[in-house]
Image (cartoon, rainbow, N blue to C red):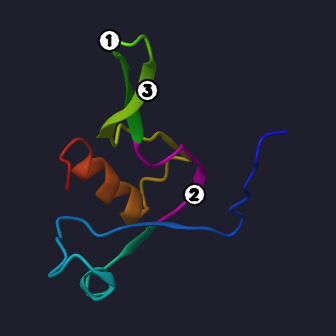
Amino acid sequence: MADEQSYIGGTLSVAKGAKPASENKAGYEGLTWVEVGKVVSLGAVGDTHENITVTTLKGRTLNITGAADGGSSEMTLVADGDDTGQDDLVEINGSNT
């Protein structure tokens, strides 16, 4: 059976156009976050790794963890033109910020 997780009560927030002063908890706590409303689902997050297969001269096949890829993550929202968080997501979409 797959390992299932539930995130009932979870939220999604965005800090549009801002970068943390430092890459730690305090840096991110210093940003102004806006909650995104009417989130239905969030896709998987996290890195996947390329598998590199190498066969040695002695005939041993080795599988080595290669480069990490952050990829993309899909989300489903109920569109709400009055939701500031959704507006912020639309504005920064594709900007890698």
* Residue at the (40%, 56%) spot, across then down: 86
* Residue 26 position within the rendered picture, expressed as x and y whole percent measured from the top left: 29, 89
Which quadrant, please, contains the N terminus?
top right
Q: Tell me if mark 3 has few (under 14), some (14-19) or many (20+) residues whose alpha carbon lies within 10 angstroms of its own.
A: few
Distance from Cα at disc 1 to Cα at disc 3: 15 Å
* Residue at the (78%, 40%) spot, across then down: 2
Residue 38: which disc? 2
Q: Tell me if mark 2 has few (under 14), some (14-19) or many (20+) residues whose alpha carbon lies within 10 angstroms of its own.
A: some
* Residue at the (38%, 13%) spot, across then down: 58
Between label 1 and label 3, give the one nearer the viewer.
1
Between label 3 and label 2, give the one nearer the viewer.
3
The residue under label 2 is which amino acid type?
Lys
Contact between marks 2 and 1 (CB within 8 A): the answer is no
Distance from Cα at disc 3 to Cα at disc 2: 42 Å
Going from N to C along the chain, the mark reached first, 3 or 2, is 2
In the image, residue 94 sits, relative to residue 12, either above or below, namely: above
Q: What residue occupies the far front of the structure in this picture?
A: 58
Magenta-highlighted residues? 36-47
Does the magenta portion include 80?
no
Which quadrant, please, contains the C terminus?
bottom left
Between label 2 and label 1, give the one nearer the viewer.
1
- Residue tagged by mark 3? 63
The quadrant in which residue 22 appears is bottom left
Secondary structure beneath label 2: loop
Secondary structure beneath label 3: strand
* Residue 37 position within the rendered picture, expressed as x and y whole percent measured from the top left: 52, 62
The residue under label 1 is which amino acid type?
Leu
The quadrant in which residue 10 appears is bottom right
* Residue 46 position within the rendered picture, expressed as x and y whole percent measured from the top left: 44, 49
Residue 57: which disc? 1
Does the magenta portion include 39?
yes
